[in-house]
Image (cartoon, helix red, strand yellow):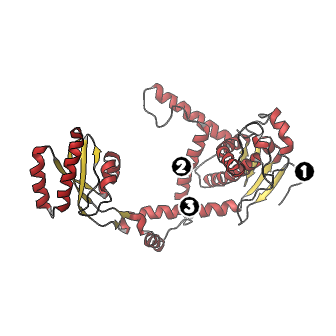
Amino acid sequence: MKRRGGHSNRRYISYGAAGIFVVALVGVCALVLILQKDRSGVDEAHLVASVNGEPVVYGELLMALKKERAQVFAYYQNRYGAEDGPGFWERSYGGTGEVPAVTAKEAALKKLTRLKVEQGLFRQYGLLADPGYEAFLEEVSRENARRLRETAAGRPIYGPRQVEAGSYYELRQSNLAESLKRKLADDGLLEVTEPEVEGYYSARREEFERKGTVRLLRVALPAAKGKDGERRLEEIALRLEEASGPAELDRLCREEAASGITCGEISLGPDSSRSDAMLQPILLSKGGLLQAGELSSLFEENGDLVILRCLSRENDQAAPLEEVKERIRKVLTDGKYEQYLQREEEAAHLEVDQQALDLAPVP
C-alpha cells in the first residue's frame, strides 16, 4: 500500500488480480458516538475518495450505501440472526468481529470504484464531459424541470413526473455503458469473432430451441351442465381416446353437436408463444406438453368444461444460427466488456478520506 506523507486520513489501494481488496476501515467503531451525535456533519460535495483521479463525493457514497443496505442486513440476519434496530450497524458480530457498517462501506466502495472506472472511460471516449457529482445533480435538475414543462403542456413523458437522483444515476450509467461498448468495439477492444459465435451456438443449442407447433382439438360443454356435463365429457373422452384418425374425430364432433358439445382446433406454436402465455394460459398448461393422441384432464375455462386431444406435435428445433447470431454477438460483447472493465478495475488507484468515510451513516 502506498501512502502520501502528511495525509493520515487517506489511503491508497491498488486492486490486484485476486479481486478488489479494501483495507480495514480503522476507527469506525470508535466513532460510533460521533455518528450518533452528527449524522449529517459532512457536506454532500465533500471529497470522500477518488478513483484514478475521478472524485467520489459524500453524496455519491450515501447513494451507494443506500443501495447496499438491504443486502447487508440480509447477510447479517441469515448468518448471525441479527435484527434491525438501534445499534445494529455499529455492533460487532461473530468471532471475526464483522460490523455491518464496515461491510456496507466496503461494498459501496467496491461498487463506486467500478462506476468511477466506467465514468473515467466515458470522459475519455467523449461520452460525458463532466463525471462529477455536482454536474450530475445539475443534470437531474434540468431533467426534472423538463418533465414539469412537458406535463404542464399536456405532453406525455416517459416514466415518473420527477426522477429520483439514485434511479437516474443508475439509468444514466447504464445508457452510457452501452455507448461505451460500441466505442470500444469500434476500437477493436471487444472484438467477437465468427468462430466464437459459432462455438457459443454449438455449446448452447438448447438455449435457442423453438417449440414445435402443437395442434389440439378442444372439446367443450357449458360448465352450467354441472355434474351431468362432467359425466358426459368423460364418456366422450373414451370415444376421443379410441378415435383412430381425423375422420372419426370429425364424425364424433358432428354427432355430439346436438347435445351442446362444441369442437374446435387450436394451434400452439413458436410464433404465438408469448400471446399464448398471456391469452390462453390454461390451454397452454393443459395442452402444451401433450403428445400426439394423448388427452388432457378435464378442466374449466371461460365458462366451459373442456377436454383436449393432441392431434399432432412437431419436434422442437434449434433456431438457425443466422437467426440468433446478433443475439449471441451481444452476449459475447457484454462478456468481453465485463472482462475489460474488470482489468481496468483491478488496476484502479483508490484514495480514501478515512475520517469522512467513518462519519458516513448507512441511510
- Name above or below for residue 187 compared with residue 297: below
Front-most of 236 and 38? 236
- Name above or below for residue 34 compared with residue 53: above
Query: Which dot marks residue 175?
Result: 2
Mark 3 or mark 2: whose residue is earlier in sequence: 2
Front-most of 138 and 311? 311
Residue receiving disc 1: 6
Q: Is residue 141 left or right of residue 25?
A: left
Q: Residue at x 67, y 42 (%)?
A: 66
Residue receiving disc 3: 184
State the image coordinates of residue 44 (x, y, percent, origin top left): 73, 37
Q: Give the structural element (helix, strand or loop) at label 1.
A: loop
Q: Is residue 339 left or right of residue 258?
A: right
Amino acid of disc 2: Asn
Q: Give the structural element (helix, strand or loop) at label 3.
A: helix
State the image coordinates of residue 68 (x, y, percent, origin top left): 66, 46
Q: In the image, which is nearer the foreground, mark 3 or mark 2?
A: 2
Q: Is residue 358 visible?
A: yes
Q: In the rendered view of the protein, which quadrant contains the C terminus?
A: top right
Label 3 and label 1: CA atoms lie apart by 39 Å
Q: From this viewpoint, which residue is outermost toward the top?
A: 152
Amino acid of disc 3: Leu
State the image coordinates of residue 227 (x, y, percent, origin top left): 24, 42
Label 3 and label 2: CA atoms lie apart by 15 Å
